[in-house]
């Protein structure tokens, strides 16, 4: 067969030969079919297709022709076209492949999809233990699963059976869960998506150019006591009530600044906000009351706000010169009085605090900076947990999440140390165990371990690709792609997502 005049149809992106030895070409102007006698272009002008540009084409076992456009997976059975739209309004399809009767599609921002029950459906993977990609946030959902956002997506760890569901997608900065079980994810500086909502039946993406986000940055997400979602952003305070978005800013309220960094709620559901440059402010549903250095704050840059069960507001002021990295101690506000604990006047391990949480006994848990581990404070005594005296994965914990039902508190580590959890024994307010996934080092495509361990490598379908035992395991023969490396011995278990 001789093919000519291909340039008449614009760029050609992919080729496929069917069982009849005829050629199908994905082109800029449509799906092109060549035979010895003719050539036919299929596009929106002569079929039910809604888009012209076809980026890839493949043939299945039944000789059906499959192709993808930006927003649709298409099947042509030699008579009619059937299209399966992407479930995200802000994303597009990048690639696809056929495995027997199974069809998998890759998206630009939302990971992999499969064609299930005549619809493109997000894929989750289940693996033993939790991945050790760098973690930036976490929460506990209604089912007791711990969700964490990582630099390679998100995962939900089930402590009951030790399995992990992995959602391969772009970097996830923060995760929160409401009392219905829905999970909200905030991507980290990637693409056009600023917020993702995962429900039992759907996944909804919100774009930066949609109201009320308008190209601003979300610093923190929280649900109040009535299950309303609040967002601390660089363009004001946003909340969602009964599906409707509302915005408080300096133009429509007495909010002191639009740069809101952190939020929490007291027993009356008042909203306490830490701002960058305008102090600590409280919203009672009508107006804002603001506290600054004039009233006793250490600085007008306030991060990491937490309200305990006695309505004491705890927070970490930051240096006005370097507010992103240098803290000024643990401060509190109660009955109009300020108090500050520092590394100089108390046993506080570090003046920089990344996160604060309270447990059922009103103990404070602090994720401290400067590689100082995790601190528990009961108002009098300080208990410090680090890699030397506990099973904490790494000393630089970034986020704390409380699971009161299972009496467990979770910690994530930024630099890839995995997940640590502490079982709480409330009769003496002590930690009975701190179990951790120890750090897993991979360098030059080799797994490097301090002690011999079993090493298993899984692909993204859960198939075992490699199994070995030792301290130096060679991964150089793996094809390029996404893998989960799982290691275990009598002392620890660890897992990590890699892209060799």
Image: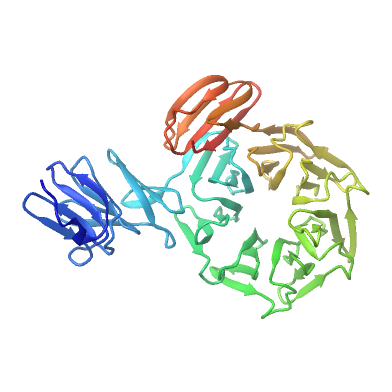
Does residue 35 appear left or right of residue 94 in this picture?
left
Does residue 374 appear left or right of residue 410 in this picture?
right
Q: How is the image coloured?
A: rainbow
Residue 348 seen anywhere in this rendered image of the structure: yes
Residue 426: give x, y in percent of width and height.
78, 40
Residue 77: give x, y in percent of width and height.
18, 51
Q: Residue at x 66, y 43 (%)?
A: 412
Q: Is residue 95 above or below residue 279?
A: above
Of the pair 174 and 465, the residue shown nearer to us:
465
Does residue 294 appear left or right of residue 412 in this picture?
right
Number of dots carrying numbers: 0
Image quadrant of residue 249?
bottom right
| Name of the residue lying farthest toward the left | 37
Q: Residue at x 64, y 70 (%)?
A: 235
Does residue 340 appear left or right of residue 163 in this picture?
right
Of the pair 327 and 362, the residue shown nearer to us:
327
Residue 454 seen anywhere in this rendered image of the structure: no
Residue 30: give x, y in percent of width and height.
23, 59
Q: Is residue 71 above or below residue 164?
A: below
Image quadrant of residue 213?
bottom right
Q: Residue at x 59, y 25 (%)?
A: 488
Of the pair 214 and 5, the residue shown nearer to us:
5
| Name of the residue lying farthest toward the right | 345
Residue 300: give x, y in percent of width and height.
81, 66
């Amino acid at each position: 067969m001789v093919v000519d005049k291909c340039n008449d149809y614009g760029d050609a992106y992919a080729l496929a030969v069917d069982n009849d030895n005829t050629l199908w070409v994905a082109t800029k102007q449509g799906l092109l079919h060549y035979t010895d006698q003719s050539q036919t272009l299929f596009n929106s002008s002569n079929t039910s297709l809604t888009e012209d540009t076809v980026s890839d084409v493949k043939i299945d076992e039944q000789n059906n022709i499959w192709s993808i456009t930006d927003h649709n997976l298409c099947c042509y059975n030699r008579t009619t076209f059937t299209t399966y739209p992407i479930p995200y309004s802000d994303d597009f399809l990048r690639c696809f492949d056929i495995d027997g009767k199974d069809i998998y599609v890759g998206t630009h921002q939302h990971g992999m999809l499969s064609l299930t029950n005549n619809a493109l459906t997000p894929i989750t993977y289940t693996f033993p233990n939790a991945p050790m990609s760098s973690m930036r946030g976490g929460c506990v959902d209604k089912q007791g699963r711990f969700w964490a956002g990582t630099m390679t997506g998100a995962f939900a760890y089930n402590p009951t059976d030790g399995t992990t569901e992995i959602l391969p997608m772009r970097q996830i900065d923060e995760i929160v869960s409401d009392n219905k079980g829905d999970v909200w994810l905030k991507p980290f500086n990637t693409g056009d998506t600023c917020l993702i909502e995962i429900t039992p039946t759907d996944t909804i993406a919100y774009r930066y150019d949609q109201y009320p986000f308008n190209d601003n940055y979300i610093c923190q997400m929280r649900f109040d006591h009535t299950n309303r979602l609040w967002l601390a952003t660089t363009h004001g305070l946003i909340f969602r009530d009964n599906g409707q978005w509302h915005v408080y800013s300096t133009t429509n309220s007495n909010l002191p600044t639009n740069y809101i960094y952190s939020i929490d709620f007291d027993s009356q559901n008042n909203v306490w906000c830490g701002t960058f440059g305008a102090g600590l402010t409280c919203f009672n549903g009508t107006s804002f009351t603001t506290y600054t250095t004039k009233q006793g704050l250490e600085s007008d840059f306030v991060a990491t706000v937490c309200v305990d069960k006695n309505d004491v507001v705890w927070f970490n002021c930051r240096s006005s010169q370097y507010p992103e990295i240098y803290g000024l101690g643990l401060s509190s506000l109660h009955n109009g009085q300020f108090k500050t604990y520092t590394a100089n006047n108390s046993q506080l391990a570090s003046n920089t605090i990344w996160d604060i949480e309270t447990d059922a006994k009103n103990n404070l848990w602090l994720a401290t900076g400067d590689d100082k581990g995790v601190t528990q404070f009961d108002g009098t005594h300080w208990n410090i947990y680090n890699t030397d005296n506990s099973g904490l994965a790494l000393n630089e914990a970034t986020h704390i999440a409380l699971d009161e039902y299972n009496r467990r508190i979770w910690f994530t580590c930024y630099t890839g140390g995995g997940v640590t959890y502490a079982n709480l024994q409330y009769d003496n307010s002590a930690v009975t165990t701190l179990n951790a996934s120890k750090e897993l080092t991979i360098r030059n495509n080799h797994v490097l371990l301090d002690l011999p361990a079993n090493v298993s490598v899984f692909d993204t379908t859960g198939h075992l690709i490699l199994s070995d035992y030792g301290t130096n395991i060679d991964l150089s023969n793996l094809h390029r792609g996404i893998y989960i490396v799982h290691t275990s011995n009598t002392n620890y278990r660890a897992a990590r997502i890699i892209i060799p």
